[in-house]
Amino acid sequence: MPVLALDDVVVTAYSPDPGGGADRVVTLLGPVTLRVEERRVAVVGANGSGKSTLARLLNGLVLPSAGRVTVDGLDTARDGAAVRRRVGFMFTDPDAQLVMPTPVEDVALSLRRLPISASERDAAARAALARFGLADRAEVPVHALSGGQRQLLALASVLATEPDVLVCDEPTTLLDLRWRSVVDDLLAGLDQQVVVVTHDLDAALRADRVLVVDSGRIVFDGDPAAGVGHYRDLMTGPGHRVGDVR
Ligand SMILES: Nc1ncnc2c1ncn2[C@@H]1O[C@H](COP(=O)(O)OP(=O)(O)OP(=O)(O)O)[C@@H](O)[C@H]1O
């Protein structure tokens, strides 16, 4: 599997001062040092703990303010395009990534860099849709698909580019139980390395490794059952009562 590495990574951002003074620098994540080469990795943690920031670092959607993120030695800050060819990203909300009017056009857009003819691209796009049970939806307007079908289309589009790694940020959060298990099963069956940010603890338990993020730090890294237990303890402990805001 590809080696995803974070070396002493810190992500900061400017945040307005409620008192009207100069913007403050806030730390969103880090320092984090991490090396991931398992096939299935789950990232869990409270809302606002830094999970999406961690996920986005892996394909260069977020760049480190300090430190280095590499994918098999490719630096996300220096070799961004090459990293994004290897690392696909799936958002919580498929509408964030579906840009074309119909499914077949959306998948074909993902294939635009392949040196193939337009008709070959169309055939490849239809084959990708068929793999996700969307063959008969190829020409239906994207907005007329159900939420679950849109999530499958987003998955078909990102996988059409044949990434070595798929990073998913809460891919099933918006789905009902039926579609959740469809998408979970598809993700579980992929050959690729998959890093998934999730609030679904059953999905986390099926991973090879679990990372628990809390207040911008990785506070647990290891066995899924122990990781989920750690996360449950964190959420019920005195530091995380409802109403606490970071
Ligand atoms: N560009 C930014 N500028 C300022 N603050 C940011 C920025 N991006 C994220 N944050 C803040 O950083 C913290 C971590 O955000 P992040 O989206 O990584 O959390 P998360 O664990 O994915 O949360 P959720 O489960 O709610 O999606 C949050 O407090 C968020 O408001």
Image: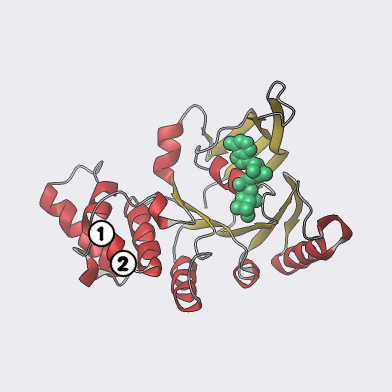
Seen in the image, is 87 located left or right of residue 19? Answer: left
Residue 183 picture location, percent across and down: 45, 69
Residue 63 picture location, percent across and down: 56, 33
* Observer able to see residue 232: yes
* Observer able to see residue 36: no
Residue 19 picture location, percent across and down: 75, 28
Figure quadrant of residue 8 = top right
Question: Which is more N-terminal, label 1 or label 2?
Answer: 1
Q: Pick out the residue farthest to the right.
A: 238
Q: Residue at x 78, y 68 (%)?
A: 229
Q: Residue at x 86, y 62 (%)?
A: 237
Q: Pick out the residue farthest to the top.
A: 22
What is the CA distance from the residue labelled 2 to the residue labelled 1? 9 Å
**Image region (quadrant) for ligand 1:** top right
> Could you tell me the amino acid type at mark 2?
Leu
Residue placed most toward the observer, 72 or 158: 158
Q: Do the residues labelled 2 and 1 touch (CB within 8 Å)?
A: yes
Task: Please name the residue that numbered disc 1 is placed on.
Answer: 103
Q: What's the mark number on residue 145?
A: 2
> Could you tell me the amino acid type at mark 1?
Pro
Seen in the image, is 125 located left or right of residue 215? Answer: left
